Amino acid sequence: MTRKKIHVIRYKFKIHLKWIHVLIPSTSALQALVSLAQTGSITRTAQDMRLTQSAISHKMKALEGLLGFPLLDREGRGVRLTHRARQYVAEVAPALERLAKASDRTELSGSLTLNVAPGFAANWLAPRLSRFMSAYPGLSITINTPRGYGDLGRRRDDVYVSFLTPDQAPEAAHHLMDVAFFPVAAPHLTGGRSPSAEEVLQLPLLHLDGTKDWSAWAHDAGAQAPHTQSGIIFQDMQIMEAAARAGQGVALGDALTSATALERGDLVRLHPHEWPSPRAYWLISGDTSKSDGKAAFGAWVLEQLGA
């Protein structure tokens, strides 16, 4: 091969690499943009994609930053794509359709073992699991729960969603959700009053995995806490919440695990102060072999949370 031909090949290869390194937007953001073009509504797009409105807005801001031009104009209560955005959608929508057909996610099969923290499993995953199963009906799912906080065992399961401190999270773990605790109790426990922090601490306290939880909340709230070591200690969040609903005492709930009980009125929030937990929910890959099922579940969780 002559030097001239080698030079031409190298030049073409460099040009190809330039195209490879062009930043390509996420398909989720592009799907949201296409949906907005069709619906003209962030609310409707969020419902169609089973995401929150804030997640859709975040995706649009990130997409604008990547593309370098504005995407949306406000129009009454809805939104309208800019002229440049409509041109862009006309170009990418057919490509998204071809990509969806090529991916054909329903062909995934095999088994997938998940290890999920009880609070996340019961209150976030369980109500949404049918969405994942409808997208991947060929997968067989098993869900385990850890023995305690921070327990990853030998990571023999495929995917973990664990409640960990940052130093417990392995390298390459994905942060999913922070948690902040606040007092919750059955409505009749205080007769509808809004007690002070000191009055909350005089009620029967329900603890989870030791008594440090209420001590930390009291200290963060700047309240005197002489009795935070008393009360029943639970090892399971669901059992503790059941005791709180039955009027046995006041527990520390959070926006995720207490959401359903608060919406139904089975529990009420007694005090506005929130104590930021040192733990958060993390997505972690187990030490099992790589598989399309593992990748699909991880991507689905991140997409649902907009993480």
Image (spheres, rainbow, N blue to C red):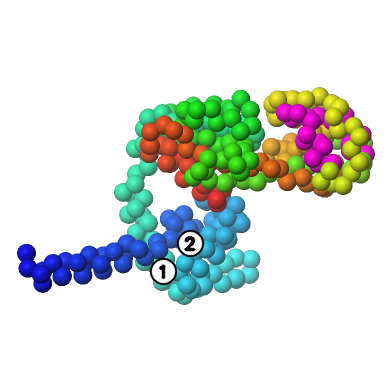
Left or right? Give the position of 177 relative to 250. Answer: left
Q: Quadrant of residue 121?
A: top right
Q: Which quadrant of the figure has residue 192?
A: top right
Q: Position of residue 277 (x, y in %)?
A: 71, 43
Amino acid residing under circle 2 = Leu
Q: Which residues are magenta?
A: 199-218
Residue 149: image location, x then y, percent: 64, 32
Q: Quadrant of the N terminus?
A: bottom left
Q: Is residue 209 magenta?
A: yes
Kind of element beneath mark 2:
helix
Is residue 50 a member of the stretch shown in magenta? no
At label 1, which amino acid type do we have? Tyr
Residue 33: give its label: 2
Does 111 sit above or below residue 71? above
Residue under numbered circle 1? 88
Distance (Cα) linking label 2 and label 1? 10 Å
Q: Where is 27 relative to 235, above or below? A: below
Say which residue appears at 39% left-offset and 67% top-offset. Answer: 90
Local crowd size for mark 1, using a 10 Å CA cut-off: few (<14), some (14–19), many (≥20): some
Q: Nearer the viewer, residue 253 or 247?
A: 253
Quadrant assignment, res 240: top right
Mark drawn on residue 260: none
Q: Residue at x 37, y 36 (%)?
A: 291
Asked whether the beta carbons under mark 2 and mark 1 sit within 8 Å of each other, the answer is yes
Residue at image location 63% in from the left, 66% down from the top:
77
Q: Position of residue 160 (x, y in %)?
A: 52, 35
Q: Position of residue 246 (x, y in %)?
A: 81, 26
Does residue 263 appear anywhere in the picture? no
